[in-house]
Amino acid sequence: MKQDMILIIDLGGEQNALLAREIRALGVYTEIHPYDLDADTLAKIPGIRGVILGGGPNNIVDGVAVHPSDAIMSLGVPTLAFDYKDAAPIPEDAEARAALLNDFVFGQCHADKNWNVQNFIEDQVELLRRQIGDGKVLLALSGGVDSSVVAALLIRAIGDRLTCVHVNHGLLRKGEPEQVIKVFGEELGANLVYVDATDRFLSKLEGVAEPEAKRKIIGAEFIRVFEEEARKLVGVDFLGQGTIYPDILESGSKTVKAVKAHHNVGGLPDDLKFELVEPIKMLFKDEVRAVGKALGLPDNMVYRQPFPGPGLGVRCIGAITRDRLEAVRESDAILREEFDKAGLAGKVWQYFTCIPDFRSVGVKDNARYMGWAVVIRAVNTVDAMTATVEPLEFAFLSKVTNRILNEVKGVNRVLYDLSPKPVATIEWE
Ligand code: XMP
């Protein structure tokens, strides 16, 4: 690795991840490490130009005051402390912070501004080639940002020694499997195995109404299908994973309890043993997007809004039926198309439709009939823990409503969900 690095030592500071992002935004690479790093581990971290001690409330972890290890303190590079011992707190004012970090990183550490997307890609391609040698890699390619960027990096590093498996569980949005095939199979020339497992998933899900039961079935079946494909391939020793830095940070550290446990393709059987390949595990989401863009992935893949793993399965409320699944897929496509046309796509964090499992009365050809209702949801959030409703214009809502009522079979009512999180959640189940 060519780049200089500022090492952030985690002494329980809540803003360490933010500091890491801010320094990277200055063009210098950062990593967050535990306070008890030993000399051997430290020696393996290249390019350390400075250390930031990110302290928390009295640096108390599980009732004990924590301090950086002797090895860290004897690195002999400039050190900046926040909230540790007598050190000042991190300035709240963004400009003051930027000036302080800028002075430390460049004025005192003399770090080179060499953290950028192109250097990252070059370094990773080299590291991937070194790790994989002449081996083969398997990757579950969902079409989401993270797995797509991992695929594009691996294609650049090892070409057709990467096999991508795209499992269509029948719960993807309109056009998604087609785009994966077009971008990776055709344009990037990947070794792509496409599995249409729609019937298999839908028959497993038949009659299952309980949301968590649906999620479990979808997750377990996904692993089963992927495993079947993995067994068909010979000589694969590596498994690519789209793990990103927040996944690691949120999985907990010595000072922070886990926010949530992350697992990507976890749960593969023990006799399928792979070494993991995780080329974007040190990147924040915006950096992943920048890398994807530099690798030539299309904007609608790179700037894609979040989409749950169980897909439309949790937006077709209750027991999934093919008619409602089709209606939710079509109405979602209309909503996304209208968001694009109105220039709202990049401005709203997440927007989608869902379809409850009740009917209401409508009229058609002078006769009463029972039809489905489609719900429009559009929310903004920073971390998905809380969310506010996007105040969509009435004219926009009317236009989408008219299109859905005219174009989507079986639907006779469109509703707009005005509930923030909490009390509601973003998804309906
Ligand atoms: P909720 O509904 O909990 O959603 O407010 C918060 C965010 O998480 C997404 N979500 C999921 N993502 N698997 C996922 O990968 C899931 O089972 C799942 N459930 C919810 C949701 O779309 C929102 O962005």
Image (spheres, rainbow, N blue to C red):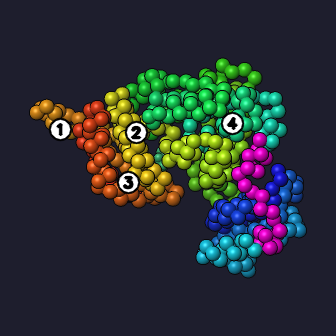
Residue 396 x %, y %: 32, 52
The kind of secondary structure element at disc 4 is: strand
Identify which residue is drawn at 24% across, 42% down.
Answer: 413
Q: Label 2, on which residue?
A: 333
Please tell me the numbered disc located at residue 15. Answer: none
Q: Three-letter amino acid code at disc 2?
A: Ala
Callout 2 crowding tier (Cα within 10 Å): few <14, some 14–19, many ≥20: some
Residue depth check, mark 2 versus mark 4: number of the one nearer the observer: 2
Identify which residue is drawn at 43% across, 26% down.
Answer: 202
The mark that comes first in sequence, 3 or 2, is 2
Q: Label 3, on which residue?
A: 424
Residue 411 x %, y %: 27, 36
**Which range is magenta?**
104-125
The kind of secondary structure element at disc 1 is: strand
Residue depth check, mark 3 versus mark 2: number of the one nearer the observer: 2
Q: CA distance from mark 1 to mark 2?
A: 25 Å
The mark that comes first in sequence, 2 or 4, is 4
Q: Is mark 3 within 8 Å of ligand 1?
A: yes
Q: Would you say residue 319 is visible in this rendering? A: no
Q: Three-letter amino acid code at disc 1?
A: Val
Tell me, yes or no, whether the two marked residues, 1 and 4, touch with CB atoms within 8 Å: no
Q: Label 4, on which residue?
A: 240
Q: CA distance from mark 1 to mark 4?
A: 50 Å
Determine whether 105 is above or below 385 in the image: below
